[in-house]
């Protein structure tokens, strides 16, 4: 699999990223987790996606750290992305879920992530959500300190609007390396509202989360989803592939902002399918047929 | 009639542009088409608006090309604007209407337009609609090639959002010369949503399509339209003009982004009326009375 | 009370601004008005907010001017902000309320404000509302002339979108010093839609109008307002303060765009309460509890 720079002169990611937010639900032994990790590494998927808030007890980061302890040499083969900035009621003495991009919160989150993962550094740290109280100068100072201390190599954001991205970028010397956003044919917001076009302008490749819309593409019986599924099946036939998830991955990757796709499954056969889909290429018209099926109306 | 630069140092258009998208419906002989063309040229309307997708069989471009063959010397007196980037079910072997700003599609469309029009060059080529799959680097390369080949002198867009405009402009050395958008007192979107203010900032004059809202201003009995028509009639009286379309043209031209108005009618008396309206000037308050009549509520 | 620069190298305002738009309703003698003015000056509130359209007959500006005549030396202790650009049916021979940022309208409004206030200069002039017919080059010329004539020291805007702000700023050499916008926990538009983030990016401090949502926070029985009031009361208890308006001021001032708060009350005990609230500091979580109570749902 190709490695790609998510921004020019920025870090290199594998074109597919293994998401670990459901790791806790995979319900397997550490040895079995290790085997899965080795398998996706063999497929070329070297970038893994974590966040401070993923998982329960233990957190996904801690579980992943335990797996890495079985084979510490794997660390250097990985690009680890993690995220900070969400405070959840479940996790701490918190009365309401909220965001927190204050220096203390960022630093505490990074220190925790490093300890859980058993690593000295994160390849990339993302602000998980846009904190409405974000002080861009303070965040920039904190990023610079974490970089100088060798704890974080690159910084990015997730679920940011263009205005929020521009604000934070205005205070940083180095480019934010990505904006991790929802991209799938069910929720077309980031496709339609200019988020991806802004990233293309600045040559920042998005990371695409929830490409399969949380699995709703497969079974949901709503009108929109049924219509969309039929179109995906038609196109799977036209492309002679077995599975509509492959068509969806090709649909996301067809976007000119060149999203890096996050795979959420812990099933190596599904991961393999996503890898196989890297060769699929939708025509301009096939891409729009999926867009039209989702919207329920033609282009304007 | 004055000629105006749509961007500083850009191409000069007549302040009114003759639209040819309904040419096929005018149902007249080639000689009669030629007479109409000569008439609006005499009025000073030298800029004509076409698109690859206008018309049926024959296309409006082909019909216009046949008219030009009767009097080839007219070509040099015209600024021909045409557009590319829409693929219609009616026109080709296409299953769903969609947009296509890929290099192959742009080039094929331009070659077709030139052949139909029987001309060596377009003065201005517009991307007709924002293709969500638009690769700005690829479009820029294609624009540069078409320019070097002498096939297109200037480039612009149509129906683009500000984000889409900024993306494409970021890859071009020369300014996009216009954004052709809907402007009329019925659909106030581009007036209210910042599209025109962004163009003013960048000193790009919009081309205004559908100034008369497809004729709905004259006869539609809806509450909004009746209220609007009454206000237009009041102001026509105040200005001592006969026709509300003249008030509408003056309303559009009052906008500080300085729209160049496209006239859709093939009736030379209506075109003459639009020319006469160039001298009309609405007061600040008259302009807002029309805005208020359309919105159905006062300013905030 | 601290003085703060609303933009770097810009004018210094007191952190709280005394609003005078309801001055006419305070129903007191000129001597009593003067006492109130001296009292808030003693508290450190040196910046006062006016507008051409505030009040009836007499206008608030004229009333304030009469107060200043009793003690002319106070002028030099004040920063007077006033606004232009609204034409009201009530005030003039006008058929519909509208905006007007034409050079003549701006100039006439400033001359009237200066005459009414009995002063030679305004510290800051704001365009009160975004005129859709605003010609940014013409406004810039007018601003420059008014500045050279010594009639206005600084310029800003009010209720402008980011696009409108960027347009006008693009024609000015000196920065617009503020965008005076509605900020309160009831109407979260400017908090949620990027207006404040854009101002933070450009280091422009907003002036916050209607922080108490026109008093609705205190008594309105709607579901939203009741829920919000209960949360404000809880947090008032946690912070050991008596009044929820203090919590609201602290909530507004917690925003990282650092709003300068306008106080609308003419009651010096309420003004004193706002001054006391300058020391209040909400936690990140307390701020979000108020946001959630207003929205009626959690963060995304």
Image: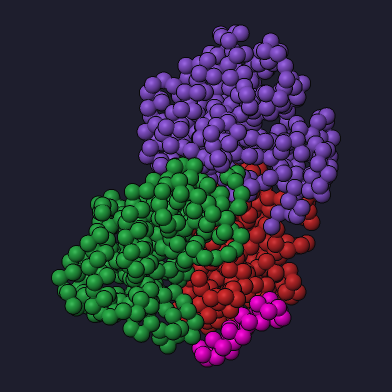
Chain colours: A red, B green, C purple
Residue at figure coordinates x 58%, y 79% from the top left = A293
Residue B209, image x, y percentages: 41, 63
Residue at the limit of the structure toward the left, as seen here? B73
**Relative to B112, residue B268 above or below:** above
Q: In this view, does B270 lie to the left or right of A283?
A: left
Q: In this view, does C75 lie to the left or right of B52?
A: right
Q: How many marks?
A: 0
Considering depth in this image, is B11 or B279 the residue closer to the camera? B279
Q: What stretch is highlighted in magenta?
A: A216-244
The answer, for residue C128, to whether it is visible in the render is: no
Residue at figure coordinates x 38%, y 82% from the top left = B56
Residue at figure coordinates x 65%, y 72% from the top left = A213
Considering depth in this image, is B256 or B287 the residue closer to the camera? B287
Residue at figure coordinates x 44%, y 28% from the top left = C107
Residue A267, image x, y percentages: 66, 79
Considering depth in this image, is B113 or B26 the residue closer to the camera? B26
Q: Does the magenta stretch include residue C186?
A: no
Q: In this view, does A5 lie to the left or right of A218?
A: left
Q: In which quarter of the image is the N terminus of chain B?
A: bottom left
The answer, for residue A187, to whether it is visible in the render is: yes
**Relative to C128, residue B274 above or below:** below
**Relative to C257, residue A176 above or below:** below
Q: Is residue B288 left or right of residue C292?
A: left
Q: Quadrant of the C terminus of chain B?
A: top right
Residue C148, image x, y percentages: 37, 23
Considering depth in this image, is A66 or C296 the residue closer to the camera? C296
Q: Is the magenta stretch mostly helix, strand or loop?
A: helix
Residue A215, image x, y percentages: 68, 76
């Amino acid at each position: 699999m190709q490695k790609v720079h998510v921004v020019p002169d920025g870090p290199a990611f594998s074109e597919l990223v293994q998401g670990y937010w459901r790791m806790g639900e995979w319900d397997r032994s550490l040895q079995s987790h290790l085997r899965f990790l080795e398998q996706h590494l063999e497929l070329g998927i070297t970038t893994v996606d974590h966040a401070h808030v993923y998982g329960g007890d233990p957190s996904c980061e801690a579980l992943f750290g335990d797996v890495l302890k079985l084979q510490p040499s794997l660390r250097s083969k990985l690009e680890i992305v993690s995220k900070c900035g969400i405070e959840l009621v479940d996790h701490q003495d918190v009365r309401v879920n909220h965001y927190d991009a204050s220096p203390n919160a960022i630093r505490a989150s990074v220190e925790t992530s490093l300890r859980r993962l058993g690593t000295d550094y994160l390849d990339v740290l993302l602000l998980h959500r846009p904190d409405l109280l974000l002080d861009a100068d303070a965040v920039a100072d904190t990023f610079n300190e974490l970089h100088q201390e060798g704890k974080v190599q690159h910084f990015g954001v997730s679920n940011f609007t263009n205005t929020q991205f521009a604000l934070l970028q205005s205070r940083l010397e180095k480019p934010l390396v990505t904006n991790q956003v929802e991209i799938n044919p069910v929720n077309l917001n980031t496709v339609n509202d200019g988020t991806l076009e802004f990233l293309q302008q600045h040559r920042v490749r998005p990371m695409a989360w929830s490409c399969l819309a949380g699995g709703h593409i497969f079974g949901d019986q709503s009108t929109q989803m049924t219509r969309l599924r039929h179109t995906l099946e038609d196109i799977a036939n036209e492309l002679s592939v077995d599975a509509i998830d492959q068509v969806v991955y090709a649909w996301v990757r067809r976007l000119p902002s060149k999203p890096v796709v996050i795979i959420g499954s812990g099933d190596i056969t599904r991961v393999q399918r996503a890898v196989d889909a890297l060769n699929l290429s939708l025509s301009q018209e096939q891409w729009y047929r999926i867009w039209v099926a989702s919207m329920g109306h033609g282009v304007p």
